[in-house]
Image: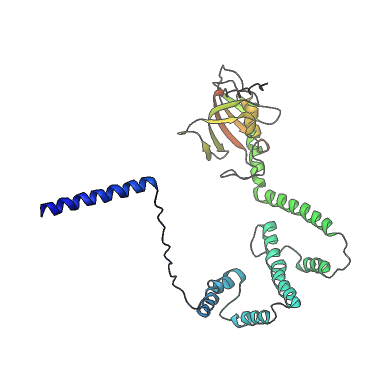
Amino acid sequence: MKLHIAIAVVLSMAVGANTMAATKKKKVKKEVEVVAVKPDTVSLDKFSHAMGIAQTRGLKSFLQMNVGIDTTKYMADFVRGMRDMESKMNDPQMKAYAMGLQIAQQVFGDFPQRINQQITGKPDTTFLNIDKYKKGFMSVMNNETLPFSVDSAANICTRQMDFYATEKLERDFGQNRKDGEEFLAQNAKLKDVVTTPSGLQYKIIKQGTGPVPQKDSQVKVNYQGRLIDGTIFDTTEGKSPFQTNVAHVIKGWTEALTMMPVGSKWEIYVPQELAYGNRETGKIKPFSCLIFEIELLEIVELPKASQPNAPTK
């Protein structure tokens, strides 16, 4: 029994040795068997039927919410239109007619409403003379003689929309300008307040003795910004100092920083035209006069650009 076991072990070792030797001489390439995965398929008819059903998902809510069609009352009319289009899908006349219906909804419905709201700032309001508007549009579609070219009409509209936008800004925020002018007029009478030729006002809280930044200087500052009613709209308190290029800030800041020695702390009073003008940003409404307390910490020396290597011969 022991002899048989020993012989078996020797034979298995020999076979193993031969196999390893053969493997060293030639690598055996294993072929990967590709197993086809059977998808969970349905018949073509069932798939086609399901695709048609799936395409209706959200359609009724779209018609109700986006197009304003009461699907409880007018769904039959919608279906009638679809059937008419379905029966003449390749008819060029039907295509043109269907497109006319779509464009009319936008041109005579949605667009005038948007223009009216943009000009007046109020939804569901009337401003455009809709009859004149429709006459202008259809006269081009019907190739009628025009009082001016389409390009001229576009230029008229651009200029007029700019006028309406300015008029709306003045109507909505013009009081900010008046309040700012009154504030600056009274502020200029206060002791230690200096008014520059540009209209910028400042008061020196602490005068530094360091160098004065140039327009292309990088500086670090601490600051607090507030409206004339005392509302704080921005501050570096509790944050890292603000670093910026002197030329990349509002005009009032640029003017003040190019007069302040490093180490200074000033309070500046910025007229709206030297601040954000008719722009709105955060809590700052158009035409707002702004007050800043600025402490100029340092002028930042930026690393000089490395010189390019000399060309090799």
Quadrant in which the C terminus is drawn: top right
| Residue in front for this viewpoint, 72 or 37 | 37
Write the residue at 57% across / 73% down. 64
| Residue in front for this viewpoint, 266 or 84 | 84
Q: Is residue 5 left or right of residue 150?
A: left
Q: Quadrant of residue 66?
A: bottom right
| Extreme-top residue of the structure | 209
The number of numbered discs placed on residues in the rendered structure image is 0
| Residue in front for this viewpoint, 100 or 258 | 100
Write the residue at 69% across / 48% down. 170
Q: Is residue 46 visible?
A: yes
Q: Is residue 162 left or right of residue 70?
A: right
Whether residue 63 is situated above or below residue 194 in the rendered picture? below
Write the residue at 61% across / 72% down. 68
Q: Is residue 189 visible?
A: no
Residue 268: x %, y % from top left: 60, 30
Whether residue 136 is situated above or below residue 300 in the rendered picture? below
Quadrant in which the N terminus is drawn: bottom left
Write the residue at 64% across / 79% down. 82
| Extreme-left residue of the structure | 1
| Residue in front for this viewpoint, 120 or 235 | 235
Q: Is residue 146 left or right of residue 32?
A: right
Residue 110: x %, y % from top left: 67, 66
Whether residue 309 is situated above or below residue 273 in the rendered picture? above
Q: What colour scheme has been applied to the protein in the rendered image? A: rainbow
Residue 276: x %, y % from top left: 64, 40
